[in-house]
Amino acid sequence: MVPTAAAVDAFGRDVTNLLGDKRVSTRETDLSAYSRDMWPRLLFAIRDGARLQAPHFVAWPESARETASVVELARKHGLPIIPYGGGSGVCGGTVPVHGGVTVDLKRMTEMSTVDRDSMTCNVEAGLNGERFERALEHRGYTLGHFPSSIYCSTVGGWLATRAAGQMSTKYGKIEDRVAGVTVVTGRGEIIETDELARASTGPNWTQLIVGSEGTLGIITSARLRVSLQPSLRLLRGFEFEDVTAGVEAIRRVMQRGLKPAVVRLYDEFDTFVHSLGSNHDNGAYGLDPKRFAPAPKPGGGALPAINRRPTEADDGGFFGRLVGSLVSGDRRGSRRALQRGLVAAALSRPRLFNTVAGAVAERLSRRGCLLIVGLEGSRIRTEAEAGLAFAELERAGGKNLGEEPGRQWLEHRYAVSYKMSKVFAQGAFVDTMEVASTWERLLDMYDAVKQAIGRHAAVMAHFSHAYSEGCSIYFSFAGYGETRAESERIYDSIWREGLAAASRAGGTISHHHGVGMLKAPMMATEHRDAMRIFRALKTTFDPDGIMNPGKLGL
Amino acid sequence: MNQAQRKQLVEELAAVVGREHVQHTPRALREIGVEHRDGDAPAWWLRPGSAAEVSELIRIAARERVAVIPVGTLARAPRADAVRKRLCFFVDSRRMDHVLHLDETSLIVHVQAGLTAHALETILAPRGLTIGDYPPSALNATIGGLLAVRTPGKSSPRHGFLEDAVLGLSAVMADGSPVHTRVAPRRATGPDLARALCGCEGTLGLITSVVLRIHRRAESRLLDAHVLPSFDAAVSSVRLALREDASPAAIRVYDGAEALAHLGEGVCRRGEAVLVVATAGPTDLAAVDRDLVASAANAMGGRPLGAGPAEIWWRRRTGHDDGPPPLAAALQIAATPGNQMPVYRAVLEAAESAGAAARAHASRFDADGAVIFFAFTQRDGEPLDDETLARIVDAAAEVAQAAGAIPLGYTNPEVNAYLVSLRQQLDPHDIMNPAALTR
C-alpha cells in the first residue's frame, strides 16, 4: 500500500492540525533517522551510500487518545503506520517499507505508583527501559527484565517483540510479566485487555496483542507485574567437560523446580572467547567458592551505570574486536594491511576458521564449557535455592569455579557494541540468532544451526533463558563480503539456512528478538496452517492493512 | 432438511465415526444434558475417536450449516434457545482420551483433548510425574474442556495457570481443516496463537490435542496452619508471603465461622481466621516456603496451629476424607488482591441485612487475585430454604460486584466487537458453538 501524493499531503495537513508542527516532522534528518532500526542488514546499504526508504512523517503523540487520532487519520488517508520505540530492534521491525507515518511513542513516559496489593505498575509504552527499572528500583521493586538493549529500548518495544531479559529464567519473558495492555487498534479504537483475575471469558487478548510488532495496533501502556528488589544475589561459575554435560546439568536444575535468575552455558569456542575478554589473569577462578556474593548495593540494583568511556568490550566482544582490527587507525600501513588481510582471509573461509578456532579454543582454554549461574530474591529462599542448584550442578559433573566468573559476567553484560557501523564499513558483519527448542531436540538443533551458519561465517553460541521444558540458544556470528552484494548474499544465506535448520530440528525461529522483516519469510514454516488465525486477527484489528506493513509475514 | 436427507446425513455421520457413536434420541441426548423439546430441530450426539474424524464431522457441518457444540466430561451442554431451531452436532471428545506422546526428557506430554486431567494424573503418577498442583476438583474435566473454558482456579502459586502450561495445541477449524501450533518453550514469532483457541469455548476452533508442560512429583510435601486475628490479617499474610517469593502448592484462608464448619470446633474463635498451607518441592525449599508463610502469618499477628487443621483440609481436598461434606458454597466470586476485603465485607453485610449469616473461605490465590467462596445459612446455622437462598445469593452477588468483585464468566465489553469480527473471519457460516460467548 503505497500512499498517493495527494493522500500524503492531506494527511500532513490533518496530522499537523492535530499535533502541531512541533510534534510532526518531515525534516530530512528525522526521516532518515527513522528509516531503520538496528537490523544489521540495513548497514550494508548505508555502507554503499544507498538511500533507505524513509517514512513520509514522524509523529510524536503524547497520549493514547492522540495516538488513536493519528491512526484514524492514517485510516482516512490510507497511510501506513509504523510504531517506533527505541529503535533498538535487530530484525527490521520498524522499517517503513512503503513510507507512511512513523509514530514515535517516546513522549509517552508516565508510570504510576506500584500497587502493593497486586504488585503491578501501570507504565506508558514510550518509557525507556533503564529509566523504568531505575524508577522501580528507587521504590524498592524490580521488573526483573534486563535485555542487553535496556539502555536504548522502551517498554512498548519489549511488549511488541516478546523480549527477554538476561534474568528471564526467574522473572520470565516480558509476556510473563504483563497483566494487560492498552492498545490503539488499527481501527483507531482504544481497548484495554486486562484479565481481571482470569474470570474473563474468551481468548486471552493480552497474549494475542503482545508480540504482534505493531501489525495489529499500537501498545500505548501496560500493567506490568513487578517483584520486590532482591535482598540477595548469588553468582557462581561452573566448568563442564562439554556442551552436552552442561546442557544436561541445566535441565536437571530446571526440572527440580529451581529458578535461577540467570543460567548461561557457553560452548567451547564461546568459553574460550569469554576467557579472553574477562581479565582472568588475577587467578580469579581461585577465589573461595564458599563465599557468597554480597547483596545488591542499596540503590544499585541489577543495573550498573552505563560506562561512558568506551572500553575494549564495547567493541562488540570477540567478533567485534576481531573485525575491528580491520579498521584500526593506529597501525602502520603495512602492518595494518597485513592484519586486515589476515582477518578478511579468515572470515572469508568460515569452515576452515570454525574448525581451526574450535580446535585452538579447546586446546588453549582446556576449560571445557563455562556455565554462569545466578540466583536472587529474598534472602532465606535464595540461599536455600542456591544451595540446591549448586549441589545439583556439581552432581551433574560441574566444577565449582567460585563467584568470580559470575561477577565478571554481571559487570560486563551490557558491554554490547553501539559502534557496529565501523565494522560494517569494511565489509564485515556480525549478528546474532536466537532460537529455542525443548530439551529433547536442543542439541540436535545446536549442531544443525551451528553447521548451517558455519558454512558462511565464524560462529559461536551460548545457551541461556532456560525452562523446565527447554532452552534458548544464542548464536553469534561474523562474516565478510568484499562487496555489498556479496555481504548481503552471505548474510541472507546464513539466516535462510540457519533458521531452516532450527525449524527442521523442531525448534522455533525466534526466542526473543522478534520477526520483523528478517524472519518474515519463515513465518509460514514456523506457524504452518495456524497462520490463518494470525491473518484473521490482522483483518479483525486492522481491516485496512495500514499497521506496520511488510512485517511478520502477513 | 427432509426425512430422506436426514437419513442420508446419519449414514454419512456413521461412516465417519461408526454407527454406535451417532445418537439422536431424546433419551440419549439427555445423557449429555440436552433436553430435546417438541419443535426443536434435530440434534445428534457424535463421539469421534480422532482429530481426523472431528475434521470430517465439521466439514459435513460446514456444508450443511449445522451448529457444532463441544461436549466434555463436566460440561453439560444445555441447548441454548438460540440454537433450538438449528440442526446441531454435539461433538463429544471423550473417546479421544489417549496420551499421544510422553517426552520425559523435556517433561512435556501430548494428549488428546478428551482425556480428563485426573486420568492423565493417573498415567503420570507411576512415572513420578504430575500435571501440577492444580485443585483436584478441577481435574475431573477433560483437558480440552479445561482449556476451552476460562475460569479462575485452574492455577497454583507454584505451577501457575494451566493455560500457561500449553506449549502447543491442535484444533479443527470451522471449515474442517486442522491447525497445529508449533511446540516451543517460548517464542517471539508474533502473537501466541494457541491463546486464541484457549478460552474460545469452541467458537473459533475445536481443540483436539494439547502439548502440556508437566512436572516431577514433589520430593516432599509439608502442611501447616495458623490462626490469625481476622480474615483481613490472614489474606494479607498470604499476599505478604507471596511477595517474599514463597511458592506454596496450595494455600487457603477460612474465616472463623467457615473454619469451625470445615476444620472442627476449637480451631479458632469467631472473628478469627485460619490459614492452611501446603508446600512442596525439594525438602529444603518446601521447608523454606512453609517458613516464609509462617513468618508472614506471625507478622500479621498470627500464631501456629501445627499441621493438624491443614491435614483435615488436605484430606478433604484430595478426596481422602469420607466425613460429611461441609455446606457447599453458594456463591463463588473472583477478586483482585485490593478488592478481596471490600467484597468479603459487602457480602457479609448483605447476608446480615437479609436476616441470614454468611461465612467464607478464600482459595486459589495467584498473581491476579483469589476466589472467595461464600456459604449462607440462617443465623443459627441451619440451612436456608432454596427460595431464600437464591434471593440472598442474588443480593450478595450484586453488592460484591459493586465492591469490585468479578463475576465468573465476565466478558470484557471493549473486546467483544473484536471477538465477533474474529469469529466472522474464522467461522463465516456461524456454525461453531454459535450460542456461546458473544451471544
Image (cartoon, helix red, strand yellow):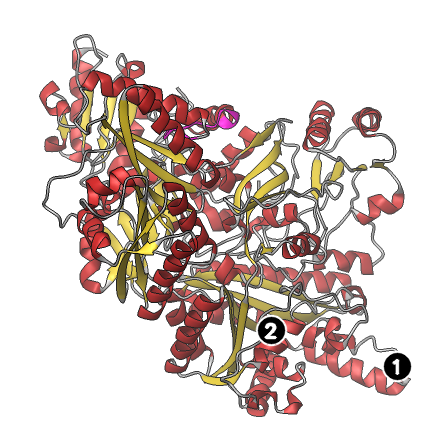
Number of the label disc, if any, that sits on residue A459: 2
Comparing labels 2 and 1, the label whose residue is closer to the camera: 1
- In depth, the one of A373 and B168 nearer the eye is A373
Q: Residue A467: x, y in percent?
A: 43, 62
**In the depicted structure, whether residue A359 falls above or below residue B169:** below
The amino acid on which the numbered mark 1 sits, given as a three-letter code, is: Asp
Majority SS type along the magenta span: loop
State the residue at coordinates (17%, 32%).
Answer: B15
Q: Which residues are magenta?
A: B405-415
Q: Chain of mark 1?
A: A
Furthest residue toward top? B39
- How many marks on residues? 2
Q: Residues within 10 Å of mark 1 (few under 14, many from 20)?
A: few
Residue B409 painted magenta: yes
- Does label 2 or label 1 sit earlier along the sequence? 1
- In depth, the one of A366 and B218 nearer the eye is B218
Q: Residue A43: x, y in percent?
A: 76, 59
**In the depicted structure, whether residue A379 falls above or below residue A180:** below
Q: Mark 2 falls on what kind of element? A: strand
Residue at mark 1: A330
